[in-house]
Image (cartoon, helix red, strand yellow):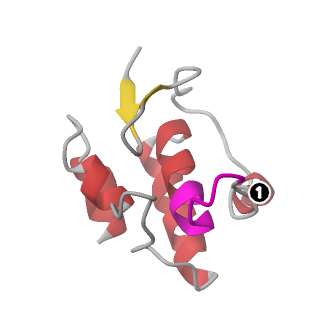
């Protein structure tokens, strides 16, 4: 199982991505509504959560929706890192990084 480091603590994906899964626009919009309870920027949290759960095509759709809603692609975690900065260290993240550009 792949591990991620959000803000100093190692985190493991709780389940594998389901490739080819169909996401409705309503389901994608639900990802805009996630709240945090530890002070993490909501925009960072929504983007990172989407990255860990969506395949490339779905993530691209989500980023378009995210930008269309006026959300902040440069939001940071408590350590001051953006999602793009975290992804730069992940193998096979090129597509996701391009989607965030």
Magenta stretch: includes residue 44: yes
Q: Which residue is mark 1?
A: 30
Q: The magenta stretch spans which residues?
A: 37-46
- Residue in the foreground of this view, choosing between 94 and 90: 90
The outermost residue toward the top is 1
- Quadrant of the image containing the N terminus: top left
Q: Residue at x 29, y 72 (%)?
A: 101
Q: Residue at x 38, y 32 (%)?
A: 4
Q: Secondary structure at mark 1?
A: helix
Say how many tags the image has. 1
Q: Residue at x 65, y 52 (%)?
A: 38
- Residue in the foreground of this view, choosing between 9 and 34: 9
Q: Quadrant of residue 100?
A: bottom left
Q: Is residue 84 left or right of residue 75?
A: left
Q: Could you say where residue 18 lies in the image, as x and y percent from the top left?
A: 56, 26
Q: Could you say where residue 2 lies in the image, as x and y percent from the top left?
A: 37, 21
Q: Is residue 4 above or below residue 46?
A: above
Q: Could you say where residue 44 lies in the image, as x and y percent from the top left?
A: 51, 62
Q: Is residue 94 left or right of residue 73?
A: left
Q: Is residue 75 above or below residue 19?
A: below
Magenta stretch: includes residue 40: yes
Q: Could you say where residue 89 lies in the image, as x and y percent from the top left?
A: 19, 42
Q: Is residue 46 left or right of residue 29?
A: left
Q: Residue at x 28, y 48 (%)?
A: 87
Label 1, residues with CA under 10 Å away: few <14, some 14-19, many ≥20: few
Q: Is residue 94 left or right of residue 80?
A: left
């Amino acid at each position: 199982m792949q591990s991620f480091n959000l803000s100093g603590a190692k985190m493991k994906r709780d389940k594998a991505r389901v490739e080819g899964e169909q996401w409705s626009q309503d389901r994608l919009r639900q990802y805009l509504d996630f709240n945090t309870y530890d002070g993490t920027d909501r925009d960072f949290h929504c983007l990172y959560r989407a990255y860990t759960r969506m395949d490339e095509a779905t993530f691209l759709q989500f980023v378009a929706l995210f930008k269309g809603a006026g959300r902040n692609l440069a939001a940071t975690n408590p350590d001051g890192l953006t999602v793009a900065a975290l992804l730069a260290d992940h193998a096979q993240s090129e597509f996701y990084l391009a989607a965030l550009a």
